[in-house]
Image (cartoon, grey):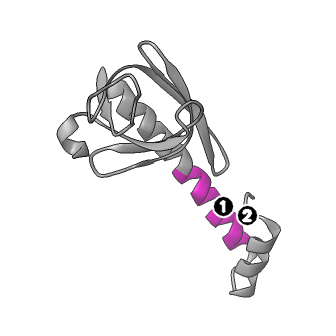
Amino acid sequence: MHFDQRTQQALRDVGLEIDDLRAASEAVVDAVAADAAALEAFFDEYDTVYSDMEMAHSSAAYPEHEVDYADITTHADEMRGWLRFETWGVPVEGGRILEDSVELSLGPTIDDRVRFAADRETLR
């Protein structure tokens, strides 16, 4: 179970039983795994994506990125991986599916939350 001791106690205090806690924990794990698969599928679907990332070597408001692959793994409620573009890559930690785009927390050298979409119009 990935709930810390305080969270488990607080949930028991409001009436949840151990079986309820286990079910909730499993539901979170399943949701994180589904999101990771959806994020990978998003990047598999498009050869090129656009982002709201500020890049020193690009004057475009929404830079274009040629996608090589996204490899995202999960452990309990954590999501981590690697996003590889044609000429560079970046570690990924966490992510979410939005209505018509995705958002990832990118590690060094970006260190920011970044939205990606199939077209620039979506990001405006």
Say which mark, if any, is on residue 121: none
User: 37 or 122, which is in the foreground?
Assistant: 122
Q: Main secondary structure of the magenta part?
A: helix
Q: Residue at x 39, y 37 (%)?
A: 53
| Residue 34 appears in the picture as rendered | yes
User: 86 or 22, which is in the foreground?
Assistant: 86
Q: Is residue 97 above or below residue 50?
A: below
Q: Residue at x 58, y 35 (%)?
A: 107
| Residue 46 appears in the picture as rendered | no
Residue placed under numbered mark 1 in the picture: 25
Q: Residue at x 45, y 21 (%)?
A: 69
Say which mark, if any, is on residue 3: 2
In the image, the segment drawn in magenta is 18-31
Residue 92 placement (x, y as % from top left) = 55, 35
Tag 2: amino acid: Phe
Q: Residue at x 21, y 36 (%)?
A: 120
- Label 2: state its secondary structure: loop
Q: Residue furthest top?
A: 87
Q: Are marks 2 and 1 in contact (CB under 8 Å)?
A: yes
Residue 57 placement (x, y as % from top left) = 38, 22
Q: Quadrant of the N terminus?
A: bottom right
Task: Left or right? Give the position of 113 relative to 102.
Answer: right
Res. 58 image quadrant: top left
- State which tag comes first along the sequence, 2 or 1: 2
Q: Residues within 10 Å of mark 1 (few under 14, many from 20)?
A: some
Q: Is residue 115 above or below residue 22?
A: above
Tag 1: amino acid: Ser
Task: Left or right? Give the position of 68 relative to 10.
Answer: left
- Label 1: state its secondary structure: helix
Q: Is residue 99 above or below residue 41?
A: below
